[in-house]
Amino acid sequence: MFQWFADHRRKKLTDVPFPAAWEDIVRRNVAHYCMLSDAERTQLRALIQVFIAEKDWEGAGGLDLTDEIRVTIAAQACLLLLGLPHNYYRNVESIIVYPSTVIPPQRKLGFFENASAPIELSHPILGQAFQQGPVIIIWDAALQGGRHPESGHNVIYHEFAHKLDMLDGAADGTPPLRDRAEYRDWVQTCEREYLRLKHDAEHGKKSFLNSYGATNEAEFFAVVTEQFFDQPRLMIKHAPDLYRVLKEYYRQDPVLRLGQNNCVVESNGKNGDAGKKEKKAQTGRP
């Protein structure tokens, strides 16, 4: 019964024509949109409409939330869902957006906790995803990543990959998969590439992947998701099996999209809420 009401509400949302202003925002701020087929873009627009309506949005640090911010973030988050069976990130209730890099407050000890080790100091972040909590996004990093996929860093893909990973109740680098064979292939391939990245990071050897992925298996999945969508040719060159398992999971093939441009972007010389200057994002993680 509850699902019927949800489906009915979502159909009413998607029956409304996608606003022309939103279309302009996506074309201007999300480079991948122009690489999609007509059918994929139609699907993405519907996902955006539902995603924006169903999530609680909060501006923080003095940020005034606008349609540009919501649409730009929603489009990138929903791109990950195009090939997946999904429920619009059911484990995401709220999205908190800061204007620029922020240092979160230091975690306090619980009433029954003892400080057996020094509490980790807070550090600047570009995004965070919590198991039972919101997704925190830094707006200037989200805009930079959306417009410039060649950087290989996308805070939206990174944090929402974490939320996909958490759907089975654990942030362990393995999202819900289809069957045992896919789990077996995933674990063998990702463990091998994770250990290779960790070895490279420990020995100061440069890898095609960001060394932050060597932190743990959860961060590895988030980092390779960024790489898969933004620099797929590099992944195929250096880790073809890793590309294959990600392609099978996401049911998308970003390499086939490269070189496609189905958009004509008309610029009036303004970047909306971002202003005339784009601040270069550091990475899609702390």
Image (spheres, grey):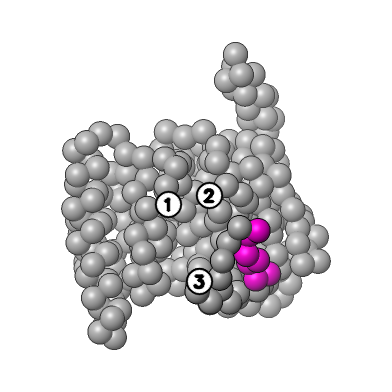
Q: Residues within 10 Å of mark 1 (few under 14, many from 20)?
A: many
Q: Residues within 10 Å of mark 3 (few under 14, many from 20)?
A: few
Residue, far top: 1
Which residue corresponds to the image point at 69% horizontal and 59% vertical from the top-left? 97
Q: Are marks 3 and 2 in contact (CB under 8 Å)?
A: no
Find the magenta span and give its range. Answer: 105-111
Q: Are marks 1 and 2 in contact (CB under 8 Å)?
A: yes
Circle 3: element type: loop
Q: Label 1 to label 2, Cα distance in Å?
A: 8 Å
In the rendered structure, which amino acid carries the disc numbered 1? Ala
| First along the sequence among labels 1 and 2 | 2
Residue that mark 3 sits on: 116
Numbered circle sitting on residue 171: 1
**240 with respect to 70 (left or right):** left
| First along the sequence among labels 1 and 3 | 3
Residue that mark 2 sits on: 131
In the rendered structure, which amino acid carries the disc numbered 3? Ser
